[in-house]
Amino acid sequence: MRNVGRISLVDAAIAELRQEIVSGSWPVGSKIPSESQLAASLGVSRLSVREAVRVLVHAGLLTTRQGDGTYVTASDESQVALRRRLDRAAAMDIIDVRRGLDLVAARLAATKRTDEDLSLMKEALARRAEASRSVDVDAFADADVDFHVLVAQAAHNPVLGDLYRSMSDALRDSVRSDHCMERAVLGSDTAHDELLAAIEAGDASTAVAVALAILDQQQNDL
């Protein structure tokens, strides 16, 4: 019975928070009150508030910034659904382009990489791992993209490097929207380490296979 009661409190908190957003009391871009303030004003536990906020984050109405707070990102869930469909279409286009670029980058990097290239890639993966441990989505996306740009640079083809760098903003958005960090947090994301190992070993065929497998997983996540 206590579980049922708790669910009803969470549902009530969700309804109250959603009303504040939809009514415009909390405009898009504004920071909502702290967890403790919301718990006091709603008369529920902080745990109930936390679960309600998590639901609205998943719905796309709120976003939580590590160490900063929670902000309103949308006031209409139907608009969120449309934006997600558009984002998915854009992400698929990016993956299609990357299949060609990553294949060439992985193959060339495995045969042309220098010790400095390997050092920079290892440093990017170390930052990526640290960001997953601290659940810092932005830092994770930055490190992930840096790693793939470094793989392209390790191919030592200036055109390929320029093309990859020009896509970096779109790549960051793609990483933020998939479940890559979730897998990293759970310890099930080993493909990037495998790609680095293949490049370090000069194994071009394995590097290409792993690079394409990473994109297959990202496509499945969409």
Image (spheres, rainbow, N blue to C red):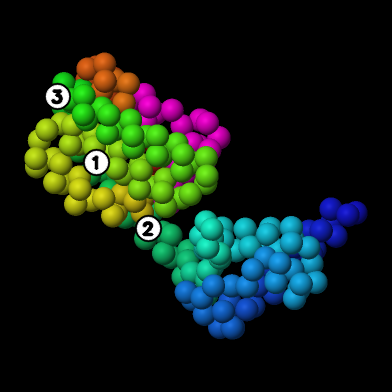
For residue 87, the mark is 2
Identify the mark nearer the N-term, 3 or 1. Answer: 3
For residue 112, the mark is 3
Q: Residues within 10 Å of mark 2 (few under 14, many from 20)?
A: some
Q: Are marks 1 and 2 in contact (CB under 8 Å)?
A: no
Q: Which residue in the protein does label 1 denote?
A: 149
Residue nearest the viewer, comparing 95 with 146: 146
Residue type, numbered disc 3: Lys
Residue type, numbered disc 2: Asp
- Which SS does the magenta portion mostly show? helix
The reply to whether the magenta stretch includes residue 182 is yes
Quick one: SS at disc 1?
A: helix
Taking 184 as reference, is 120 left or right?
left
In magenta, the rendered stretch is 176-195
Residue nearest the viewer, comparing 201 with 2: 201
Q: Is residue 60 above or below residue 166?
A: below
For residue 98, the mark is none
Which residue is found at the position 52% from the left and 80% from the top?
27
| Placement of the N terminus among the 4 image quadrants | bottom right
Taking 29 as reference, is 206 left or right?
left
Quick one: SS at disc 2?
A: helix
Identify the mark nearer the N-term, 3 or 2. Answer: 2
Q: Is residue 4 visible?
A: yes
| Gap between marks 1 and 2 measured at Cα | 22 Å
Taking 26 as reference, is 214 left or right?
left
